[in-house]
Amino acid sequence: MITERRLDTVDMHINVGPQHPATHGVFRMVLRVDGERIVDCVPYIGYLHRGFEKLAENEEFQEVIIHLDRTDYIAQFNNEFCYLMAVEKLLGVKPPERAEYARIILAELNRIVSHLMFYGAFGGDAGAITPFLYAFRERERLQRLFESVSGARLMHFYFRAGGLKEDLPEGFLEEVRRILPVLKQGIDECDTLLTENEVFLSRTVGIGAISAQEAIDYGCTGPILRACGVREDVRRSDPYSLYPTLDFDVPVGKKGDTFDRYLVRVQEMRESIRIVEQCLDRIPEGPFRTPIPRYPHYRVDPGEVYVHTENPRGDYGIYLISRGGVQPFRVKLRSPCFCNLMALPAMLRDAYVADAVMVLGSLDIVLGEVDR
Amino acid sequence: MIGVLKGLVQTWKTHWRKPVTVQYPDERLPLQPRYMGFPGLIWDQAIGEPFCTGCQVCMRYCPTQCMYVTMQDNPKQAAGESKRRKIVETFTIDISRCISCAICVEVCNFDAIEMTHAHERAGYYPDVVPDLPQLLKMSEDFRAQRGQKPARETRDVL
Ligand code: SF4
Ligand code: SF4
């Protein structure tokens, strides 16, 4: 006689990270798995904590910018943009039109750089090395442009309260105009390489999906939220700078899975190119900075302000308190990656272990910003 | 299958493109004119002394606190050759800690310091801390090099 006996299985814990090539930085997650299926995931962060918010309290408003570069270190111009809008609001100055357009051009190009970086790394996560090389070829064109503008390839420190550090270099706008068609072609090539690739599709479609309601509950923003079909973009919902005058679409996905997150970003790159093209047509000659008394050691009146912008990774917010003087009293960063990352356990529920890396890659986290 | 084949055609096409990479130690990409390497001190040709007065403003604002500056009375002023009452005595920058942020350039009231193109300075400890003569030389070399042509112009390739 055969008696039926239940096999008692024990959940196993798998540790991924903190130094693992798939975690894109120093990030650790502990997966609880039942066979191949993930039951639970606990993310551990804080390995890259540098105390940005505390450091900012001991430095002048101008110097804080260098730390902003180092929070989201793939989208530096976007971060500076957000912080300086906060400072300018407190100072009560408006940057000249040329500076506004220059900022938008640089921020949008930086968005393309960031998404290309995501594209390359994501292809790598899926086991494809070629997209990485393609993406970096395109990215390099823009990095050289940035180097010609700010003198640094990564930590630009180029935006200043009231405008820019110095004027755009001679021939910069023509160079951007020359590069845009090449870039467009490059993005199309990247698109051909992955978007229709069946192997890639089978690794991404339907993996790590969350519903729109869940994404909103977790506070997800940026491409993660838009992939769920929510048309939410700070550039549209709470317009800042000259974005209301610019014409662009906000691409959204349908299912909120890993593939939609990828596709939204690819489409966003094209929209960014559209924005840059419009800015190139409109950017006027003129001053690049509004004079501020006692620059660069300017004094800021007491006050509080919260400014948020649409970074490549989502809704990036700066809450700035000044009690007068040359130093900020408090700088609080609303980090989009941090909120997006917290949705990771929900996305990984019931996924396979092999997909964990793909889902994490699709979040496009930058640990410098998560941990500040 | 179609998507994979499309990708293959793409890689095949790319195979015939001009490479964008250079063989690094032999060929170098040109640096942009605004490139910021490590800071160097400017020499005042007219008088024959550094512009730097050793006022320590840059030292105070440097975010990594990698500079050390001291000041002395200017002997040339006593001799009537210079208008600067004070002059730099020692000046060191620990460039293993310098982040090339150019804050020192921005805060200097005497335009005495500039960002040079020096960047390949890896080394062991004492070698990465240039002192005053070396810092002056960095700036001098930088100014001498500025007319120089790069090994290969890749602007059209990239
Ligand atoms: S470089 Fe400029 S700021 Fe620094 S000590 Fe010399 S004069 Fe002062
Ligand atoms: S560039 Fe920045 S880190 Fe380097 S010495 Fe100057 S202020 Fe200090």
Image: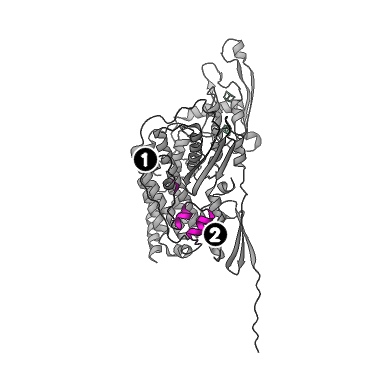
Q: Residue at x 48, y 57 (%)?
A: A123
Q: Residues at marks 1 and 2, common chain?
A: yes
Q: Is residue A180 left or right of residue B126?
A: left
Q: CA distance from mark 1 to mark 2?
A: 38 Å
Q: Is residue A222 magenta?
A: yes
**Residue A111: horizontal and vertical position, in percent?**
45, 46
Farthest residue, direction front:
A303
Residue interval drawn in magenta: A209-234
- Quadrant (top left, top right, bottom left, bottom right) of the N terminus of chain A: bottom right
Farthest residue, direction top:
B80
Q: Chain of mark 1?
A: A
Can you see residue B72? Answer: yes
Relative to B20, say whether A330 is above or below: above
Farthest residue, direction left:
A281
> Disc 2 designates what residue?
A357
**Residue A281: horizontal and vertical position, in percent?**
33, 39
Going from the N terminus, do you reach mark 1 or mark 2 first? 1
Quadrant in which ligand 1 is drawn? top right
Q: Chain of mark 2?
A: A
| Closer to us: A173 or A87 | A87
Q: Is residue A38 left or right of residue A239?
A: right
Can you see residue A132? Answer: no
Q: Is residue A328 magenta?
A: no
Q: Amino acid at mark 1?
A: Cys
**Residue B115: horizontal and vertical position, in percent?**
52, 31
Q: Which type of secondary structure does the marked residue at label 2 adopt?
A: helix
Relative to A91, say whether B79 is above or below: above
Q: Nearer the viewer, mark 1 or mark 2?
A: 1
> Disc 1 designates what residue?
A279
**Residue B84: horizontal and vertical position, in percent?**
57, 15
| Closer to us: A288 or A237 | A237
Q: Residue at x 62, y 42 (%)?
A: A51
